[in-house]
Amino acid sequence: MTRSPVTLTNAEKVLYPATGTTKGDVFAYYTEIAPVLVPHTAGRPATRKRWPDGVTAPAFFEKHLAASAPEWLHRGSVAHKSGTTSYPIIDDIDAVAWIAQQAALEIHVPQWRFVDEHPGPATRLVFDLDPGEGVPMAQITQVARAIRALLAEIDLDAYPVTSGSKGVHLYTPLQRPVSSAGASTLARHIAEQLQRDLPDLVTATMAKAARTEKVFVDWSQNNAAKTTIAPYSLRGRDHPTVAAPRRWEELDEPDLAQLRYDEVLHRVARDGDLLAELDPVTAHRGADRLQTYRRKRNAAKTSEPIPASAPTTGGNDVFVIQEHHARRLHYDVRFERDGVLLSWAVPKNLPDDPGVNHLAVRTEDHPLEYARFQGTIPAGEYGAGTVSIWDTGRYDTEKFTDDEIIVVLHGTRVTGRYALIRTDGDQWLAHRMKDQRLVAFTDLEPMLAAAGSVEGLRRDRWAFDGKWDGYRMMVYADADTVRLRSRSGRDVTAEYPQLQHLADEVGGHRVVLDGEVVVTDRRGVPSFGALQNRGPEQAVEFWAFDLLHLDGRSLLRARYRDRRQLLETLAAGTAMTVPALLPGDGAAALGAARERGWEGVVAKRWSGTYQPGRRSSLWVKDKLWRTQEVVIGGWRHGERPGGIGSLLMGVPADAGATGLVFVGKVGTGFTERALAELAKALTPLRTDVSPFADRLSTRDSRGVTFVRPELVGEVRFAERTADGRLRHSSWRGLRPDKSPGQVVAEW
């Protein structure tokens, strides 16, 4: 369908008299902010609030799409009691521009998306913190932090947005979509729990009489029939403020205020989208990213693949080069990425000489099916000519950003390291890199699992491994040597001489293994305490659960099913330990782990690739014990002179902030040996400066010796309070395999 550009009219019309902000200014803001706004509105029906005569004149809500709306605008229908309403879906820059041209200053969307043209489940929660009469911003932010703490107890994140009006919105991405009714129930329970915890500060009651000097936690906007102002939307206030994403540390600022549109543009240029994790690009862009592709092709005339539905994401590891005899011969270079083929037209193909660069022009994204396309595009159609596959294969990613791509190609005709570098707009340079060495194996960081529930996962899509109570370890082995690296990247080969036998177990192969160093108890169950307190005679084992490199071949882009099969084949007939996977679905795996006394279960998607250094949802960990890694910030003295009675614990503050967030004290679980080791390790770290971001209470700081925050330990705990403290914590031991920067809140 031909798309006419959106034309701005009445650009000089003033919409915000107090600031002189014109319709042209609004149009410019919306078209510039569109790349970060669209992920949060795509797939959702948009209700518009319009001020065609400016914010001092009456406004009106508009739901149904007028007949005069452009045909290319995506639509979605929702059945209401009064009839069926057709809504616009704001999923690209043209749709955003159309909104601005309509003087629809505010965009309101629900927390659910359309699925197969019908209203689908909620993908996120929202809490609208609405201040009652006499409530300062400091009280609102205090309530926001308390909600964040409650959400953290069920492994959910929260992202703050100053609403552009009076309050704050908190958004929470859901690991698995739920019905809007389920989302509303969960949000209501959290709001009511907060009302019980902070009765002087919070109300979860709709009645206005109950809101005086309290923050109303409005959970009802999770209802399928309700909407919330979209992140990055303007507000129809006296001043052109915006629903602006914020960092958590900003909520501590005494002069926290709503932001204007020009301030938001500056922040986005500097920081990007602070809500990027709320609505990941891959979750919504499938259909949108193929809009241009579909618009240029007529399915009745060309044999090119034109999928009607949103694509599924692949492994981000396939490339294809197609020879294209159009008006002029050129080569189309395509990389699979986030469900589409990113495409470049390269007139002279990729260079084979590092001293020569070739022009590459970025073209529209193509569907994944195009990687297999060969044929003739009819005359008169876009790209008319003959297309054939010149080369195809897999690639390893070293860097993949909007402006620079470095990949290692493993094709039949093309191999090696290549770079694509953007020079201006759609203009790029293709370069064969002079240094053709691959990334060193020792540069690998372990892939990390996302916290979640495995109970509903099926065995046809997921494998279920044990979560072992030990130290994560990367093993680099061949017939002659074994090197061991901890999760933090430290070389610990000398600390585990018992594992040198792995050189004999790999059968002359050169491998990189991922696994866990464990010491088992009498039942054969890994024991972290036994590992911590092992003597020289104690048996230390390496349990391998993944194979990342084999004889110089990278397996990072191989599917987990294939890596697992290779690992089991490698270990067959040797003494190498590869723990068996748990049978059954997720619920059965959890039951088996509970019976065996294991720490938990890690579910691994059979089709998933290995993503070094990333916490990926391709692996999901479900703990049966509540444990937390902590950074030691000080100690309180015990009964013995100079002895340790308890440790002060913290976790790193949010990105951009400094210091530790205090999470409480631990004073049980220590052996005499552990106390002696702690005293020896902490004494040289003593300091007069508190490592905690906030001043501790007199009770918490009395008799404390502060230390530099350099040591990581692990505790078990019963629960986490609303103010972020760990209750009934018990010491498990130091974690020399972890650095403070790797500690994250996992409760």
Image (cartoon, grey):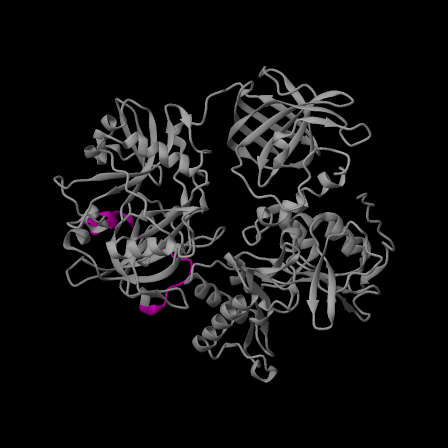
Foreground pick, 246 / 730: 730
Quarter of image, res 263: bottom right
Extreme-bottom residue of the structure? 209
The answer to whether residue 194 shows anywhere in this view is yes
Front in this rendered view, residue 615 or 382: 382
Residue furthest to the right in view is 10
Location of residue 648 (image quadrant): bottom left
**Would you place residue 66 above or below residue 329 in this image?**
below
As drawn, 698 above or below 288: below
Residue 616 drawn at (x, y percent): 46, 46
- 463 lies left or right of 284: left
Stretch in magenta: 677-699
| Residue 398 image offset from top left, x and y in percent | 50, 31
**What's the residue at 30%, 30% (across, down)?**
570
Where is residue 182? Give x, y as percent.
52, 67
Any part of residue 688 in sight: no
Q: Quadrant of the C terminus?
A: bottom left
- Quadrant in which the N terminus appears: top right
Asked if residue 39 is among those painted magenta in the image, a careful observer would answer: no
